Image (spheres, rainbow, N blue to C red):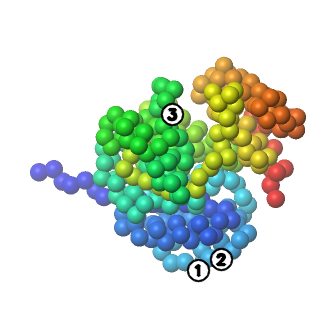
Amino acid sequence: MTPPPETPRIAAVVVTFNRLGLLTGLVERLREVPELAEVLVVDNASTDGTGAWLAAQDRIEARTLPENVGGAGGFHEGLRWAVERGADLVWLMDDDGLPEPDCLSRLLADRRDLEFWGPLVVADDDPGRLVFPIRRPGTATVLRTVAEVTAAVDDPPYVGDVVIPFNGVLVTRDLVERIGLPRAEFFIWGDDVEYLWRARRAGARVATHTGALVAHPATDALGSPMLRGRATYNHSPSDLKHYCMARNNLVNLRDYHGWPHALAFVAKTAWFYAFTRPSPARLWLSARAMWAGVRGDFTGHRRFLR
């Protein structure tokens, strides 16, 4: 008689920075999830009272970092912490996501042999719309609604080989030990994509569960149209976000897809800020960020921190 499989030890890791109002709602939701062995919160040196609030909570483990190391540094620290504490599975999420009460149970019920898998991330004000559209691997098809994703399922309830990282994703301990931790030096933007691409390169089994949901604030400012709507560009009014996006995206494209893709991104950025939304200052900022990425300098974003 085959013995029943051991129940995995599951830890939730939340990275937070100055969003106490959102964090409190997320923590209360996670306290209600019976499958979780523990909830670990990494506080990125918040200044809004988050540290004091966390210190007063029970059934929560919290670690306040001495300085803000961004989402990348926070997930690097949190994932290492969870593995050190014996987690077999780690459920990763930002403080602005809110998983449905049955999200984790759905992910676990249909686990199969997956190593890096997660839910659909839907707009909190419109649950039928995806916050982060999904591009089907190997195609130009972009799925923007829950209905479109459901219709595209190739292995019910999953869309294979794609996931929105660090928004309610589960990662196995074995995969972490195989590929390492997220790149802390990225600070923000692109660290999640790099981790997904690294996992794929290592042969990890990746998927999105179409029946598990995480609600997230809409990010309509992203995906600004260009070239008469034939393409989009991730414009942000924040110099910090843009600097990190330009630097990290160039590095990711170079490392995982080669220089032709990286140079295409350079050209796209130049076109956007020369013609679509003219800004000499943003062109100069983009050039500095990209050159820093080529040189392997991941310190330039610090000038934008307050």
Left or right: 205 in relation to 41: left
Q: Secondary structure at mark 3?
A: strand
- Residue that carries the numbered disc 1 in the rendered image: 56
Check the picture and name the quadrant holding the C terminus: bottom right
Whole-angstrom CA distance, mark 1 to mark 3, is: 44 Å
Q: Where is mark 2, residue-wise?
A: 52
Mark 2 Cα shell of 10 Å, populated few (<14), some (14-19), many (≥20):
few
Up-down relation of residue 91 to residue 226 (above or below): below
Question: How far across and down, in percent of the image, does residue 166 sit?
Answer: 53, 50
Q: Amino acid at mark 3?
A: Val
- Estimate the spatial distance between the alpha carbons at disc 2 and disc 1, rounded to whole Å: 7 Å
Where residue 113 sits: x, y (%)?
33, 42
Q: Is residue 218 left or right of residue 251?
A: left
- Residue 84 vs 150, above or below: the answer is below
**Residue drawn at the location 56% of the way across and 64% of the way down:** 41
Question: Which amino acid type corresponds to the residue marked 2 in the rendered image?
Answer: Ala
The reply to whether residue 99 is visible in this rendering is yes
Residue farthest toward the left in the current orientation of the protein: 1
- List the residue tagged with mark 3: 142
